[in-house]
Image (cartoon, rainbow, N blue to C red):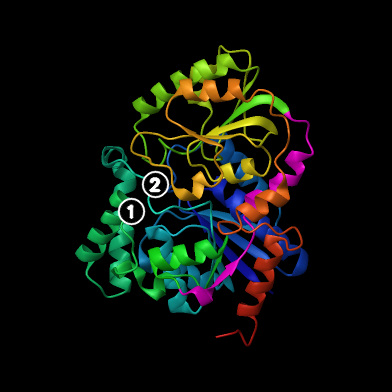
Amino acid sequence: MMKAVFFDACPTMLAKNGLPIAEIFKTKEPDFSAIFVSADAASQTDPEMERSSENKITKDNRYRLIHFKSFNRKHIEKFLRKEAPDLFFVDAFRIYDQLWISICHKLGIKVFSQQHGFEIDSVFYKPAAIISKYKKLMRFTVAAYNLARISDTSFLKLYYQYCRYIVKGTPLRQTLLANPDFQPTIAFVYSEYYKEFWQRKFGFDKNRMEIIMPTDLLLVKPVREQPQQDACCYITQTLVEDARMMRGDFLELLKSYREVAKSVKKFIIKLHPRVSPEIYEEIFGDLDNVEITRDFPNCKFYLTHYSSMAYAAAFVSNNVILHELPGHPTHELFRAVATSVVHSSKEIIDYIKSHEQDTDLAKIEDRVKALAYYTSYNDAEHPYDVMYKTCLLYTSPSPRD
């Protein structure tokens, strides 16, 4: 019998990132079971998506979903001792992920992390926006305190280093948070670039990383098979939800996008899984050519800032527009997929008008070559199969050291 625990901030992300892995394990291990643990730490999630995600997970009687809000190390250890999983999965490296990872290592539980999105050195959190989420800030402070206690290090020093990382993007490699006990047994990453990235930023051992194709790129083939729409798709991000932008500033941005929407035949808003549609309905609800969806469409134009889905868009379209926001410089990682980097709604409109005749899909073989340093794209090796085989290797009776 094999048991896994999947851990994330909310049910929506557990269903998106953890459930597909569990489904692969279930097909290969007849006695497989899984517990999905939500820390309930995500901000401003969509209640409907949360309910739908819970239902997706719990419809299989081999799966359980629990809400575990405590960041008390003793409570977490008690839970893990009781459940005794064979493996533990995370898809982020937040302070509370590190806390759970450290306790897993203490108990001899193998930990696997799946890279979630195209990470960059800093996502430019706004201090005022962070402070406005004081309840979440207090919970993370508790997680930091427990992490310091379990590793027998200075809480004040660890917390100071953590705050510098959040606000300034300071690398954790030379800090208390680079403790190998806080790191996964194996990290699944997207490319050689990311092996270097995770080593440079967090001090991960390159020998403990395995390259997989980003799971979002599994969308590319089915999307390309759809008819291309003469539309501009705005790929949303959790800018307000994750304290990277003040709500008032974001509303002004969306108001400026009304002019973009009016200038095209169709304007599709592709929602991030954790984003609620309400704010978009408020701004665009009276425009007949606007569609709000969670599905990824095949469009002539894509617009975003630094969403990981820009990579999926680049494998579909030759027109990927990145709107660089004040205080959010466009990283080289995203410039690699951008057809144009703009700074205003007028520039977006001008670009679309000047490329209205572009209807060809992006050539996958060209994209594979051009982006090979940043991302793998391998049709022959399904990423979830790679995860399964690797996990089996490390959780077998005589795992590799």
In this rendering, the answer to whether 169 lies above or below 260 is below
Label 1: few (<14), some (14–19) or many (≥20) C-alpha neighbours in 10 Å:
some
Quadrant (top left, top right, bottom left, bottom right) of the C terminus: bottom right
Q: Earlier in the sequence, mark 2 or mark 1?
A: 2
Task: Answer with the quarter of the image where residue 110 lies.
Answer: bottom right
User: What type is the residue that disc 2 sits on?
Assistant: Val
Please give the residue where the numbered disc 1 appears in the rendered image.
169
Quadrant (top left, top right, bottom left, bottom right) of the N terminus: bottom right
What residue is shown at x 63% (from left), y 49% (from top)? Answer: 216
Q: Secondary structure at mark 1?
A: loop
Please give the residue where the numbered disc 2 appears in the rendered image.
123
User: What type is the residue that disc 1 sits on?
Assistant: Gly
| Residue 194 belongs to the span the image colors magenta | no
Q: Position of residue 392 (x, y in %)?
A: 66, 75
Disc 2 vs disc 1: Cβ atoms closer than 8 Å? Answer: yes
Residue placed furthest toward the left: 156
In this rendering, the answer to whether 21 lies above or below 225 is below
Q: Which residues are magenta?
A: 205-228
What residue is shown at x 75% (from left), y 40% (from top)? Answer: 224
Q: Secondary structure at mark 2?
A: loop
Left or right of 160? Residue 72 is right
Q: Position of residue 68 (x, y in %)?
A: 46, 55
